[in-house]
Image (cartoon, rainbow, N blue to C red):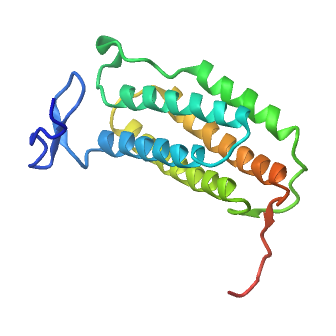
Amino acid sequence: MKIYTKTGDRGETGLFGGPRVRKDHLRIEAYGSVDELNAVLGLVRSESLPAEIDAVLESIQNSLFDLGAELASPDPARMGVPVVGAAHAEALERAIDLYEAKLPRLKTFILPGGCRAAAQLHLARTVCRRAERRLVSLAAAETISGELVVYLNRLSDLLFVLARELNRVSGQGDVPWRKGVQG
């Protein structure tokens, strides 16, 4: 099978089990942002990570693929695609609680940075927030599962906590925001 089909050469793509839509359609923007987030997490995982954090990120990448498949279909149930539900968000909450318990209490905002993998997780967090915004826009225009927005909201929180944890274990610590510093 060839990788190119030429069916998208006029700016349209086909939804899984649905119609053809413009490539800038809200649904395509949403799952494109989720795909970008997944790629950034792949970049993070190319770093030397503690095995347990790598396993968490691998699980998240699989869930993001499921979420993308759900978004790629206007009727996920009919197409038999995996559904991201409340249990997925609850798993993220458990991971947040586990890692946050190891961290010093925040007393100020922190800058994205620290060790390389933590900085990449901060980038992933911002891409996650964009994907969440795209989902909110899509949800205002079409019916999608509300659990998808909840999942991405929790995921951005977990990525923040994991970035802090990587800074902690690297010995670099968080980079505090110094209000009013001129650049």
Q: Residue at x 44, y 41 (%)?
A: 34
- Residue toward you, 58 or 22: 58
- Of all residues, the one furthest to the bottom in this rendering is 182
Could you say where residue 118 lies in the image, as x and y percent from the top left? 69, 54
Write the residue at 14% across / 49% down: 11
**Above or below: residue 14 compared with residue 29:** above
Residue appearing at x 51%, y 27% in the figure: 63
Q: Could you say where residue 7 lies in the image, as x and y percent from the top left?
A: 10, 39
In depth, the one of 53 and 128 nearer the eye is 53
Q: How many marks?
A: 0
In the rendered view, tell whether residue 34 sits above or below residue 62.
Answer: below
Taking 88 as reference, is 29 left or right? left
Query: Considering the image in quadrants, where does the N terminus appear?
Result: top left
Quadrant for the C terminus in the image: bottom right
Q: Nearer the viewer, residue 179 or 1?
A: 1
Q: Is residue 69 above or below residue 42?
A: above
Q: Which residue lies at the image location 30% right of the left edge and 19% below the top edge?
A: 75
Q: Position of residue 165 (x, y in %)?
A: 78, 46
